[in-house]
Every structure is written in structure tokens, then in C-alpha cells.
Amino acid sequence: MSGKTQSLKQLALQKFKHNFWGVFSFYYILLVGFVSVFAYVLAPDSSQHANQMHLSIHSETPGFTVDILTVPNQIKNTQSSFDKIFFGTINTETEIPISKHSIKNDTLLYTEYASDGLIGEEKVLDLNSFSESEISKLVSSKTFHLGTDKYGRDVLSRVLVGARISFFIGFVAVFISLIIGLALGSIAGYYGGKVDAIIMWIINVTWSIPTLLLVIAITLALGKGFWQVFIAVGLTMWVEVARVVRGQIISAKEMQYVTAARALGYNDYRIITKHILPNIMAPVIVICAANFASAILIESGLSFLGIGAQPPMASWGAMIKDHYNYIILGKPYLAVIPGLCIMSLVMAFMLIGNALRDALDVKS
């Protein structure tokens, strides 16, 4: 008989590769992850939290183009390149949307942009304090590909930067839930008896409290903020992991390889971590994919309620909260765009969870 026997991992990977939606979701999640990390490099507005406001051009439609007068400031930006790439640029320049401008006798005459067909005020800027290179860069045309929000901020930039919160809260929440869920589930399933009864009581009490209510309570206890939300969501998602791990270990601890490990004198910690857990991770991986999606939805709900990421931090849930009333005011895209982002990312995690479930199913 020729050829090498494929391992279960290779068979699972091969089966996953044949699942179109699973592979598509995997690459889509990688794309969102890349955007999350390098959001400030990709965003047209690279200021911190993409928070450059121009109230005169608020709620403009996608594709809106306007001339921007950029007036340099005497304060110099001392940020490092690393800081600018990953945390945004501290804006030291003044940006003014203008409708028309002209240069006469070392002065710049410009008219500020006014919405709703109003005529803006004409102003004068002395150019004697600027170099020729600075003068050539004073006025530039800027296109807002997804329009502007009610504060005149670039919607595209806010969407790109807001992806960071929704994406990373999944990682942090799943990491916290894995640590707590694996530890408590393993102890309860392996030792049983009173230890199992106590842990199951904790699990059932936590399970009985509505998730959103528990997250709100933890968030209020820890305080409003970026990391507080991450921790709060993670502390509510360990229950399902613990229940599954407990059930799997109760079945696995009676297997022959566990009995053999005990006979060889291995301690309980080694038996659980080296022998049992690696053999029961398939259902846990599927649950983690679903928890990713749940964490994104919970964070979006918290931001919508005003408990999640605080202004001026960009968040998809907060963007919906700020603009949901625009749905009936003729500009629904301001709320629909971040809503579609949430929906697509959640769906990608659910699809990849289904693909992993099929690929890791030993019966098939």
C-alpha cells in the first residue's frame, strides 16, 4: 500500500479547505484584523480616534468633495512614527472647509463653507509668515467616500478605526473566557463530588443572570472605559466553555489513556493539561468562534446604551447610537453602514464556527 496515512489534523484541515464559506470567512476575518491593526494608516483621517470635526459639512452624502484650508500651527508634533501608526496623530493643524479662495498681495481670501445653501463669511489670511512650500499645501481637495457624520467627521475613517474595538474585544473576551472556563470546567469534571457541586452552583447562578445585565453591572463596578468593557464581556462568557469542558472531561477521564497515565504516576495537572484537554478541544474551538460573535454583539449593544467605548473613541455600536434617528430623516446610511459592518463580522465568525464544527466532527 503506497502513500502516507493522513493524521486527523490533516484530514480536518483538508475538509475545512473544501468549505467555501469557511475559507471565505477566514480570509475576511484576517482582512478585518489587518484593518484593525493598521486603521490609522488606511484611514483618510489619521487623527486620534478619527475625530477631526468640521461642523459646517455635517451629514453630507457619500462622495462629497470640498476644499480644505489647512493652517499650520506653531506647536510641533513630537510623536514617534510608531505612535502615529498605531494610536493616531495628535492634530496640531487647523482645518477649515471653504467654498472658494483666491490669493492677492500676499493674502489669502477665502469663504468658509456653509451648508444648506447659505453664504459663508469671507475671511483673510496673511501669507507672509508661511514659506512657499507651506503656501502650496494650504488648500487641498478632500473627498469623503462614505460621507460625514453629524459632527462633520469622516465616516469611512470612523468605520476603519471602530473596527479595532469590535475585533479586539472578541480576542480579549475569548481569552478571558478560555482561562476561567478551562480551569473551572477541568476541576469540576475531573474531581467531581463536592468540588463539582460547588462549581456547578456558581455556573448555574451566573447562567441564570441575563448576559447584558451582568455585563452592565460589571462595567458599572469597574467604571466606564475601553478595557473595562473588554474585561466585563470576558467575565460573562466563560460559563458555556466551563460546561462543555466539564462534560467532555467527565467522559474522557474514564478512557484507557487516562488510566494508563495514572498508572505511570503522572500528577493530575499533567493528566488534565497534557492528555485530556488536547483531546477535547474541538468543541471548545467551535464555542470560541461563537463567543467571538457574541462578544462583538454585546460590545455593540453596550456602546449603543452609552456604557461601552466612550467618546471620542470610534465604535460601530456608538456610531449607530449617534445616528439611528437619521434612518427616518432621510440619511439612513449613517446608521446602516456600521450596522452592516457588525453584521458581516458576526456572520463571518458564525460561518467559520460552522465550518470548524463540520471539519472537526470525528463521526464524518
Image (cartoon, rainbow, N blue to C red):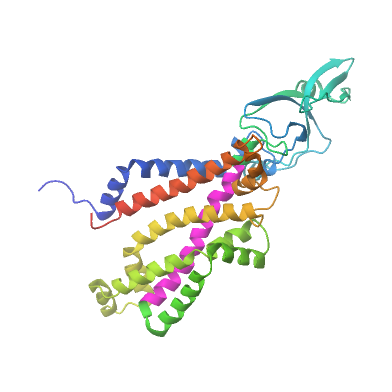
Residue 51, quarter of picture: top right
Answer above or below: position of 184 versus 85: below
Instruction: Count numbered badges in the picture.
Output: 0
Answer above or below: position of 37 versus 241: above
Answer with left or right where residue 148 lies relative to residue 273: right
Residue lying at the far top of the rendered structure: 104
Q: Position of residue 352 (x, y in %)?
A: 39, 48
Please tell me which residue is depicted at 43% across the width and 58% down the height of the picture.
Answer: 288
- Predominant SS of the magenta segment: helix
Q: Position of residue 104 (x, y in %)?
A: 87, 14
Please tell me which residue is depicted at 86% across the width and 20% down the height of the picture.
Answer: 109
Q: Which residues are magenta?
A: 161-189
Quadrant of the frame with the C terminus? bottom left
Q: Is residue 13 magenta?
A: no
Please tell me which residue is depicted at 76% across the width and 27% down the height of the picture.
Answer: 116
Residue lying at the far front of the rendered structure: 328
Residue 337, quarter of picture: top right
Q: Nearer the viewer, residue 201 or 51?
A: 201
Residue 157, quarter of picture: top right
